Image (spheres, rainbow, N blue to C red):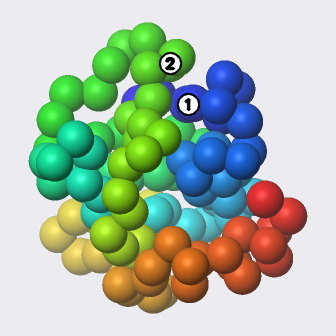
Amino acid sequence: MANITSNYGFSSPSGRLEQYTIKRPQEVLLVQVIVAGQEDEIMIFKGFSSSLMRPTAFDPDVPVLPDGAEIVSIARLKAPYNPSSPQYIQQDLTWEAMQPLLAQVGV
């Protein structure tokens, strides 16, 4: 898993989502994105991001969710994440719908 907030700051979507999960460790985010025309699913938990569909770089400076990626939807789930029995808090959030939740935790 790559933690990219240290180099990309809290203003990038990935940095803000990672900070959100640090402040809400009882949640896991599953983010559907399009990166360079390809679909990807990224899991974010306790400040770390990992792609579920492609290899994640070992170098923490390589962003899993690069700037310019299109966020299709965000799902909030209860931690710990169990893929065979996911417990959704909210599904199909847009980036815009996620803004108030980010603001609630100050990111």
Residue at numbered disc 1: 3
Label 1–label 2 contact, CB within 8 A: yes
The answer to whether 3 appears left or right of 71 in the picture is right
Mark identifier at residue 19 = none
Quarter of the picture containing the N terminus is top left
Foreground residue among 18 and 86: 18
Identify whether 8 is placed above or below 45. Answer: above
Residue placed most toward the observer, 20 or 45: 20
For the C terminus, the quadrant is bottom right
Q: Is residue 57 above or below residue 42?
A: above
* Percent of width and height locating residue 11: 72, 47
Q: Which amino acid does label 1 sit on?
A: Asn
* x then y, percent, for residue 24: 69, 64
Q: Which residue is drawn at 45% across and 79% down?
A: 94
Q: What element carries label 1?
A: loop
Residue 29: % across, % down? 46, 63
Image check: 94 left or right of 23? Answer: left
Tell me if I can see residue 85 in this picture.
yes
Tell me the amino acid under the disc marked 2.
Pro
Whole-Å distance between the Cαs marked 1 and 2?
6 Å
Q: Which residue is drawn at 32% across and 69% down?
A: 72
Q: From the viewer's perspective, tell me whether residue 38 is left or right of residue 62.
A: left
Determine which of the numbered discs, if any, sits on residue 60 in the image.
2
Q: Residues within 10 Å of mark 2 (few under 14, many from 20)?
A: some
Residue most extreme to the right: 106
* Residue pictured at 70% horizontal, 26% vertical: 6
At x 22%, y 41%, the residue is 36
Image coords of residue 30 (percent x, y): 37, 63
**Dot 1: few (<14), some (14–19), or many (≥20) neighbours within 10 Å?**
many
| Above or below 2: residue 33 | below
Q: Is mark 2 on a helix, strand or loop?
A: loop
